[in-house]
Amino acid sequence: MTNDNRLGVKITTLRESLRLSQAELAERCDCEVKVIEGLEEGNLAPSLAPLIKITRALGVRLGTLLDDDTNVGPAVTRKGDIEEATRLKSLETSSDAGLLQFFSLADGKSARQMETFIINADPSGELDHVLSTHEGEEFLYALDGSLEIAYGKDIYVIEPGDSIYYDSIVPHQVRAHGSDSARFLAVVYTPV
């Protein structure tokens, strides 16, 4: 396998992570073993049809094989590294509902379908009347302090250990409840 064969390296890494032999992957893809061998070794020019079959058999998106990122493994963020994780300034929101600071927990994971964050919520003022709406789903798990979630016309308060899962298309807003800050885990899925 050549160093310039990123596609082959990714296929091999994903196949081996699933503990599949080349023959087993070929069987799952309904293709010949020589196709898998040729792609992994960089001796066969990739074409779309077999790549789509391979991605389905490996359980990944086509983009996972085709993008420039070579990391196809998991992203691990250790407890002590959370505050040092990339802070996503573009997701900071400031309004009458307070300041939300997002710390990514999956910075190193390419081609991800979900975004995971630890979010610090600082209290401020009354509930803002501007609610957010977008495609997808969100899961919030309260770690410290209380959270107040405006969801449609309803208000939910969750305490440490509580969680809420909702469709993001419904207008919503998340804020610290009361006068204390809150900290929570958020998992956000937005369809591609």
Image (cartoon, helix red, strand yellow):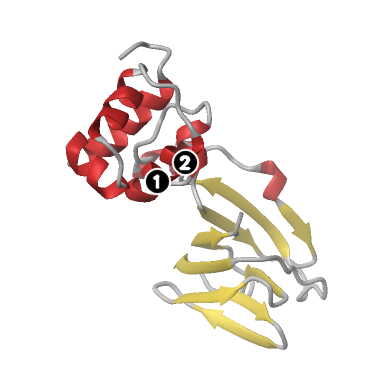
Callout 1–callout 2 Cβ contact below 8 Å: yes
Tell me where residue 17 appears, x and y as whole percent: 24, 39
Residue 82 appears anywhere in the view: yes
* Left or right for 111, reference 41: right
Judge whether 174 appears above or below 63 on screen. Answer: below
Tell me where residue 5 appears, x and y as whole percent: 40, 17
Residue type indicated by callout 2: Ala
- Disc 2: which residue: 49
Badge 2: residue crowd in 10 Å (few <14, some 14–19, many ≥20):
few
Judge whether 179 appears above or below 47 on screen. Answer: below
Q: Nearer the viewer, residue 122 or 184?
A: 184
Describe the element under mark 2 as helix, strand or loop.
Answer: helix
- Disc 1: which residue: 53
Q: Quadrant of residue 65?
A: top left
Residue 18 appears anywhere in the view: no
* Left or right for 27, reference 115: left
Judge whether 166 appears above or below 56 on screen. Answer: below
Residue type indicated by callout 1: Lys
Residue at 82 percent across and 71 percent down: it is 130
Residue at 47 percent across and 46 percent down: it is 61
Badge 1: residue crowd in 10 Å (few <14, some 14–19, many ≥20):
some
Residue at 27 percent across and 49 percent down: it is 28
Tell me where residue 35 appears, x and y as whole percent: 31, 30
| Quadrant where the image shows the N terminus | top left
Q: Nearer the viewer, residue 92 or 13?
A: 13
* Left or right for 136, reference 29: right
Residue at 26 percent across and 41 percent down: it is 26
Q: Quadrant of residue 168?
A: bottom right
Judge whether 97 appears above or below 111 on screen. Answer: below
Q: CA distance from mark 1 to mark 2?
A: 7 Å
| Quadrant where the image shows the C terminus | bottom right
